[in-house]
Image: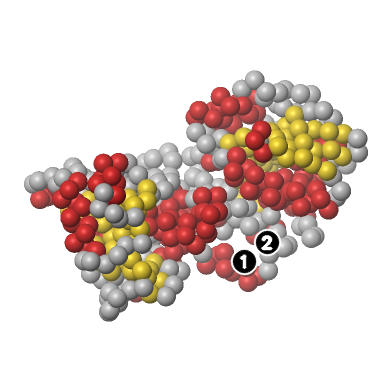
């Protein structure tokens, strides 16, 4: 594999011959598949092994699983080619690396939520690599940085862009010079391993805010309609005639709020939303019980066998009521932003198609918009009930397509 000039900068910025060797940190951001991750991981380990012996380092991802998948999977084949030996202790989340008589320890951490900062307290690092840093809580990132108290320690940050109000953008990228940090922005053109056909496929996979962030590499505000590419006249079809090969129901449960059920039928590789159920208790003047909703869902199925019923994970009592009927029920994955990205891709690729008889879903599609007043990306909590269960279904489908590796591949951000 050959490296681009920007990748070479990442690999060598810490060397004495580099004009950036006096910097305390490096930040690489930009497009997906731009070659950031592999050169950051390789550069980090080469720097650590060249500068230290008997030291400890941190490799951090949104979870330990994502750190292992994104960082270790990218760098270990390279270490093998370079003749560098390692031993992985998976239960300890530890990688021991030996080279030229030196031996260092690399610990894996997951910065998933605010509680994660406690996991990293008390340890001393000679350096830390934070992959997908914008997905981590600020408390975890700052705790990881504070652990780097060894003389000569350096910080390595890698991410895809988020919104311009994100704390990391404001506190690190905009203040890179003030923080004595090397900042490098990547595009897909900085990855010589990608063919133009692959670049074109990635460009066609995203739309709206996700296109601007993941393809153009912009720190841009989410605004306007969430599914701004959707055109009812062009993208909506009549329900297919006759039976489908398989059926799945998606559920957003509500008592005071509306309840929305979607019936999806598969024809070949395409899933059609062939029917729906939508009940707004405030509009109707009466709340329904779990037992009544179970009857409504069975009526929607109309005697068809459901391969799965994907339900709002917070609806514990309704999930139990459904299971008592013998239905195959699964709790939905509820990472909103990742789910919207997956849903948008599947709508655009026609893996899922909305049918013209699904009036409430189509109504919400044309009203579902980003909350531009929010400091973090989030859709408005209105006109979102069919949108939520459609998202549950799309992520379920991504899980099926990816097999056992779904959780690592489908609900996390694309690799850089």
Residue at position x 52%, y 67% from top?
Answer: 204
Badge 1 density bin: few <14, some 14–19, many ≥20, Cα 10 Å? some
Image quadrant in which the N terminus is located: bottom right
Residue 388, above or below 397: above
Secondary structure of residue under mark 1: helix
Q: Is residue 352 visible?
A: yes
**Residue 238: x percent and y percent?**
27, 76
Left of 43 or right of it: where is 340?
A: left
Q: Nearer the viewer, residue 376 or 112?
A: 112
CB within 8 Å, label 1 to label 2: yes
Instruction: Give the side of residue 210 with respect to residue 44, left or right.
Output: left
Please report the residue visible at 72 percent of the width from the left and 32 percent of the height from the top: 57
Secondary structure of residue under mark 2: helix
User: Residue 314 bears which disc, if any?
Assistant: none
For mark 2, what is the residue?
189
The residue at the far right in this view is 100
Q: Nearer the viewer, residue 407 or 340?
A: 407
> How is colour applied across the structure in the image?
secondary structure
Horizontal relation, residue 311 to residue 28: left or right: left
Q: Please give the residue where the numbered disc 1 appears in the rendered image.
A: 199
Cα separation, mark 1 vs mark 2, equals: 8 Å
Q: Toward which corner of the image does residue 181 lie, by quadrant?
A: top right
């Amino acid at each position: 594999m050959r490296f681009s000039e920007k990748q070479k900068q990442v690999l060598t910025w810490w060397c004495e011959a580099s004009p950036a060797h006096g910097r305390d940190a490096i930040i690489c951001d930009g497009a997906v598949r731009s070659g950031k991750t592999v050169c950051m991981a390789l550069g980090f380990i080469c720097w650590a092994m060249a500068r230290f012996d008997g030291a400890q380092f941190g490799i951090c991802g949104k979870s330990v699983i994502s750190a292992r998948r994104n960082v270790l999977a990218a760098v270990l084949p390279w270490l093998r080619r370079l003749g560098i030996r390692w031993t992985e202790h998976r239960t300890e989340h530890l990688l021991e690396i030996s080279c030229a008589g030196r031996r260092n320890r690399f610990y894996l951490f997951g910065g998933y939520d605010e509680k994660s900062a406690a996991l990293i307290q008390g340890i001393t690092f000679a350096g830390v690599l934070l992959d997908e840093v914008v997905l981590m809580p600020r408390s975890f990132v700052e705790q990881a940085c504070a652990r780097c108290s060894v003389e000569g320690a350096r910080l390595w940050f890698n991410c895809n862009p988020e919104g311009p109000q994100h704390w990391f953008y404001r506190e690190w990228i905009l203040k890179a010079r003030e923080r004595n940090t090397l900042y490098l922005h990547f595009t897909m053109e900085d990855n010589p391993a990608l063919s133009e056909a692959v670049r074109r496929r990635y460009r066609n996979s995203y739309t709206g805010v996700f296109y601007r962030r993941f393809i153009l590499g912009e720190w841009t505000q989410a605004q306007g309609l969430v599914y701004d590419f959707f055109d009812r006249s062009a993208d909506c079809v009549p329900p297919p005639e006759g039976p489908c090969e398989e059926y799945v129901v998606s559920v957003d449960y509500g008592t005071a709020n509306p309840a929305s059920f979607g019936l999806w039928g598969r024809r070949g590789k395409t899933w059609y939303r062939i029917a729906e159920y939508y009940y707004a208790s405030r509009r109707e003047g009466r709340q329904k019980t779990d037992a009544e909703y179970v009857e409504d869902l069975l009526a929607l199925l109309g005697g068809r066998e459901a391969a799965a019923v994907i339900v709002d994970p917070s609806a514990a009592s309704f999930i139990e009521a459904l299971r008592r009927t013998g239905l195959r029920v699964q709790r939905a994955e509820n990472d909103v932003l990742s789910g919207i990205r997956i849903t948008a891709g599947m709508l655009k690729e026609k893996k899922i198609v909305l049918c013209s008889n699904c009036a409430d879903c189509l109504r919400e599609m044309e009203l579902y918009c980003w909350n531009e007043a929010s400091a973090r990306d989030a859709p408005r909590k209105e006109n979102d009930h069919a949108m939520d269960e459609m998202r549950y279904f799309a992520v379920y489908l991504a899980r099926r397509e990816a097999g056992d590796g779904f959780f690592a591949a489908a609900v996390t951000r694309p690799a850089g």
